[in-house]
Amino acid sequence: MNNTSPLLSVRNLKTYFNLDEGTVKAVDGVSFDVLPGQVLGIVGESGCGKSVTIKSLLRIVEKPGEIVGGEMLFRSGSAAGPGPNGQAGEDMIDLARLDARGKQMRSIRGGEIALIPQEPMAAFSPVHTVGNQLIEAILLHQPVGKQEARRIAIDRLREVGVPAPEERIDAYSWELSGGLRQRVMIAMALSCHPKLLIADEPTTAIDVTTQAQVLNLLRVLQQQHHTAIIFITHDLGVIAQIADHVVVMYLGRVMETGPVDDIFHHPKHPYTKALLQSIPSVQAQARTQLPTIAGTIPHPFNRPPGCSFNPRCPDAIPGACDQHIPALHPVDDPQPVSCFLYHDMVDEEVAVR
Amino acid sequence: MNSNAPNGQVLLDVKHLQKYFPIRKGFFKRVVGHVRAVDDVSFDIKAGETLGLVGESGCGKTTTARCILRALKPTGGQVLFRTEADRLVDMATLPGEELRPLRREMQMIFQDPFASLNPRMNLLDIVGEPLLVNGLKDRRRRTERVAEVLGLVGLRPEYMRRFPHAFSGGQRQRIVIARALALNPRLIVADEPVSALDVSVQAQVLNLMLELQQRLHLTYLFVAHDLSVVKHIADRVAVMYVGKIAEIAPTPDLFGTPKHPYTAALLSAVPVADPRVRSTQPPLSGDVPSPANPPNGCYFHPRCPHVIDRCRTEAPVLTEISPGHYVSCHRAHELELPGIGELPAADLGD
């Protein structure tokens, strides 16, 4: 974390889905930075746009989804690892402007930005051995031969704690347990020394004891390789355990962002506060009523006017929150918040509609 | 309404329940082994109580729940249920025609409200179906009852002509609960009822279940993998591991002073939502063994940090070590394990 200029800088990202019934603004003006070696946690409930955000980053948004605005500046190519074409120079590339199927994007995707998907069972091909899939990724992104790639693959498997990697490399994904499968997935993501690792709910589909192992492993690897991680989850417990910095999302917008300790101990946004209160805790008293957030997450076609949280917000200000969309402000503050309780900055970019 | 069994009377008594699934191989489908999904499980649930059943995937908690409802026929053991007429019947062996009238006394809440509601039926049909099946043919009275239970779970009765797609996850789970309540059951088996829901909605459903329990004098068997959820709803908790019960205790005891190393490991693996309490202890190593090929002795011994020689050969039995606290561990008396209050000071590593 010695380097303070961001590795990735997302500004006003907008990804919309144009459907027959109308436009779903899955991501509507999202901004955040990822510093080198930082673990950024993005939390939010279903439909908040966290998955679409990372799909936009990797440029794998399916039709009819489309990035309609904003920029995603990524510092591509560096001395730490081989760049896309082997050059060592650093420049900021706007991922939003690259051709999603072009050479440059393909070399960044999987090479410099790697993904750990949610369901390792669905992410692996069942008809190829995990080794073949690992080696394929290495051959695509590194100038090595097949023998060398296999050796690297075995090393990576050993690194993530797969027992007997020389044998497991020839196993099929369905022969492995959930925890091992996720470890192989992590090995694959790390195989090309990415600068940015995106983990999309990597522990949601697995059990708690395995989850603890995977979190531990990610933490150790992150410290060894100094990889920046964007960690997406809906589980606040996991975020508290792993993240340095947190982005709280709700209905396609960033509600609040800040250092992990401030988010958990001094939350500002009413949504963050409500979310923190409503999680059941093992430390709480047995059989007690939980504080709840009133109402439900609105349907994407029925987005309320103004701040999207205002119909559920206990502190909503009539006349302001239900008419204007607050900006994420102040920009230079470590913990900016999109809420009129703290400032009266309207988000001009999206206020038009 | 319900003929209420007095609180404290045993409503359900499960004794040595077993469910084996055969493994078949070859052209003649010869049986080559058994998956011991549930292997000698015993517990009881008192009227008006909530028993939480926790464990990791594949530990047999769902199979146990299904055997109790006789959605599966147990291989062995007894499931004694006290009927409304105060008669003790064994659900495990009861023939089909005698089972049917009992089914309305026990209902199920399913995990995924997106999979458990027929998209082509409206709420009136969905919630009214159990009433129709159980002989309430009069459409007007059925509609009244549906309106009544929808009100109970906090849905507006005007919605009853709508279809499930019009509702969010939390509302759908309310519909599932309404359907389970339609017949005035006494026992509700809830299989991971909130794990498919978002946190902000999870809390609403948990609160609703607590409230309904008090109002309608319900008894819950609450199956879950999430210990923090179980802590909020259960009076007592049973922890399962590879088809067996590892520990049963009143909720505060289980969380405060766990006596089985597996329970302690589960508790320490729950990520605490506080960045100042970052877990430093090494997590439990290894994987859950397969119930088709479990290890000898105690099933937990290959992963247990406190293993002794005896554990490798001799399987422990569930014994009561303090009132109401049952543990299946040879070293239960001597071990001092960290509970949830003391985390993360104590050790699991040596």
Image (cartoon, rainbow, N blue to C red):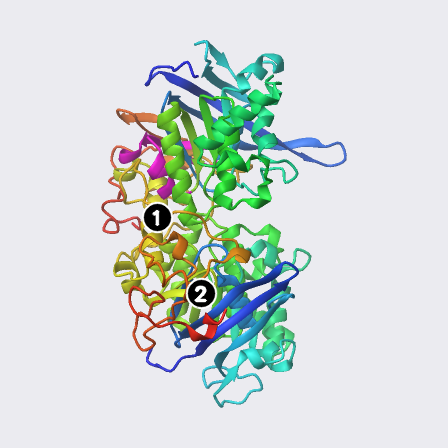
Spatial CA span between label 1 and label 2: 21 Å
- Residue drawn at x 52%, y 82% as measured from the top left: A94
Q: Chain of mark 1?
A: A
- Residue drawn at x 26%, y 32% as measured from the top left: B333
Magenta residue span: B226-253
Quarter of the image containing the N terminus of chain B? top left
Residue at which label 2 appears: A253
- Image side of residue B196 versus residue A40, left or right: right
Looking at the image, tell me whether mark 1 or mark 2 is earlier in sequence order: 2
- Image side of residue A130 versus residue A194, left or right: right
Residue at which label 1 appears: A278
Q: Circle 1: is it few (<14), some (14-19), or many (20+) Cα within 10 Å?
A: some
- Image side of residue A299 versus residue B121, left or right: left
- Residue B244 on the magenta span: yes
| Figure quadrant of residue B207 | top left
Q: Is residue B90 above or below residue A110?
A: above
- Residue A327 is situated, as x and y percent measured from the top left of the image, at 38, 71
- Residue B138 is situated, as x and y percent measured from the top left of the image, at 61, 18
- Residue B28 is situated, as x and y percent measured from the top left of the image, at 75, 31
Q: Nearer the viewer, residue A315 or B8?
A: A315
- Residue drawn at x 29%, y 56% as measured from the top left: B274
Q: Which mark is residue A87?
A: none
- Image side of residue B63 versus residue A313, left or right: right
Give the amino acid at mark 1.
Ser
Give the amino acid at mark 2.
Arg
- Secondary structure under the numbered disc 1 in the rendered image: helix
- Residue A40 is situated, as x and y percent measured from the top left of the image, at 39, 68
Q: Is residue A122 visible?
A: yes
